[in-house]
């Protein structure tokens, strides 16, 4: 029975991965990746990693993919060029490189002397991979990694907000610059006449 | 099922993601392919965790998920910033670091 589930989940994961790469429209790419992630969660369940599977579905297929869908909807990804990569030779070379890497990995996996890989896995205790066990490990043995992960998430969230913030204060930041203002024959005053602090309130000099 | 099967699936997903990164030009799709590669690594980590019968590989996989979430947040922020500046959303056109 486990074999049937494994092959179903593996085919789903591979189909989702291929769909992500091959589909032209980024919106469908995101949906294919959601399919891939859910199939991968099924594989995690088969490997007795319950908490990782739950986190995969909730965090990845839920939260992160919603972020992707919003950005694709904001940017409007449908009008992508139909042409895929650059030069055809470069494309074939990259595909050849990926295939060579797969062959190399398969040689490493299948030709290894590790007998542990040929078995169905070592014995495991009753609570293997449950949230209680994972939480206990996170708060005892891996406390430093846990705290570093929380700090990393905080930094990434602040960085994303700073990167993607809207530069407000000017009508259109690209159309107004000091040089344009000085070159304007309608402009009679000097810089001293201008309201003080407006540039700072506008968030610095206008971006190109 | 022996662990080898999971590792082969992991290698296949990794190589599909690698091929996508090398051939696609839309940065959004490149980020998606990066997710594929990180997930392939996750699958290998969980498979090895099962093979050895301890849970440290699962902890590692969860940390990788955190790193992937951070990468998505920063990467999508960059893409939105690129879009706001009316630059082309194409990694071949974006060859200057200076804005």
Image (cartoon, coloured by chain):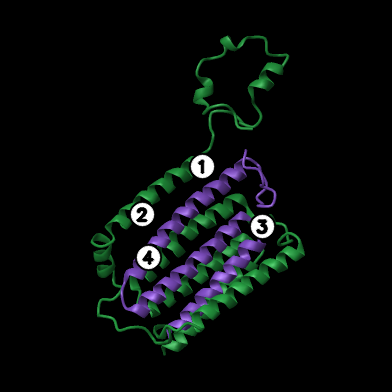
Chain colours: A green, B purple
The disc numbered 3 marks a residue on which chain? B
Label 4 in the same subunit as label 3: yes
Mark 2, other Cα within 10 Å: few <14 / some 14–19 / many ≥20: some
Mark 3, other Cα within 10 Å: few <14 / some 14–19 / many ≥20: many
Label 1: state its secondary structure. Answer: helix
Mark 4, other Cα within 10 Å: few <14 / some 14–19 / many ≥20: some
Q: Quadrant of the N terminus of chain B?
A: bottom left
Q: What whole-number distance in Å separates the C-alpha atoms at marks 4 and 3?
A: 31 Å
Q: What whole-number distance in Å separates the C-alpha atoms at marks 1 and 2?
A: 21 Å
Q: Which residue is mark 1?
A: A163
Q: Are marks 4 and 3 in contact (CB under 8 Å)?
A: no
Q: Is residue A8 visible?
A: no
**Image position of B78 (left or right of B2):** right
Tell which tag, 4 or 3, sits nearer the viewer: 4
Q: What whole-number distance in Å separates the C-alpha atoms at marks 1 and 4?
A: 29 Å
The disc numbered 4 marks a residue on which chain? B
Q: Are marks 1 and 4 in contact (CB under 8 Å)?
A: no
Q: What whole-number distance in Å separates the C-alpha atoms at marks 3 and 1?
A: 21 Å
Q: Is residue A54 above or below residue B1?
A: above
| Position of residue B42 measured from the top left corner of the image (x, y, whole percent) | 44, 68
Q: Residue at x 67, y 66 (%)?
A: A94
Q: Are marks 4 and 2 in contact (CB under 8 Å)?
A: no
Label 1 in the same subunit as label 2: yes
Q: Residue at x 59, y 59 (%)?
A: B30
Q: Residue A82 sits in which quadrant?
A: bottom right
Q: Which residue is mark 4?
A: B60
Label 2: state its secondary structure. Answer: helix
Q: Is residue A104 above or below residue A82?
A: below
Q: Which residue is mark 2?
A: A149
């Amino acid at each position: 029975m486990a074999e049937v589930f494994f092959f179903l989940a593996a085919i789903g994961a591979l189909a989702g991965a291929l769909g992500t790469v091959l589909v032209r429209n980024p919106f469908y790419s995101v949906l294919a990746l959601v399919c891939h992630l859910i199939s991968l969660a099924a594989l995690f369940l088969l490997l007795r990693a319950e908490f990782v599977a739950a986190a995969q579905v909730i965090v990845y297929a839920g939260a992160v993919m919603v972020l992707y869908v919003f950005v694709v909807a904001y940017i409007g990804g449908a009008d992508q060029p139909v042409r895929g990569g650059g030069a055809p030779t470069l494309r074939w070379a990259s595909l050849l490189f990926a295939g060579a890497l797969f062959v190399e990995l398969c040689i490493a996996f299948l030709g290894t002397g590790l007998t542990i890989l040929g078995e169905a896995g070592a014995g495991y205790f009753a609570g293997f991979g449950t949230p209680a066990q994972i939480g206990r490990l996170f708060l005892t043995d891996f406390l430093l990694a846990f705290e570093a992960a929380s700090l990393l998430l905080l930094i990434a969230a602040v960085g994303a907000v700073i990167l993607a913030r809207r530069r407000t204060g000017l009508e259109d930041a690209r159309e107004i610059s000091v040089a344009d203002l000085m070159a304007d024959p309608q402009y009679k005053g000097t810089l001293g006449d201008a309201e003080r602090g407006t540039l700072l309130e506008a968030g610095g000099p206008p971006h190109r | 099922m022996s662990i080898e099967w999971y590792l082969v699936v992991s290698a296949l997903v990794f190589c599909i993601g690698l091929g996508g990164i090398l051939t696609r030009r839309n940065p959004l799709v490149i980020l998606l392919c990066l997710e594929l590669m990180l997930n392939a690594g996750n699958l290998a980590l969980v498979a090895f965790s099962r093979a050895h019968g301890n849970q440290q590989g699962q902890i590692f996989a969860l940390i990788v998920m955190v790193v992937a979430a951070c990468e998505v947040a920063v990467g999508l922020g960059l893409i939105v910033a690129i879009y706001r500046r009316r630059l082309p959303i194409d990694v071949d056109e974006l060859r200057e670091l200076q804005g």
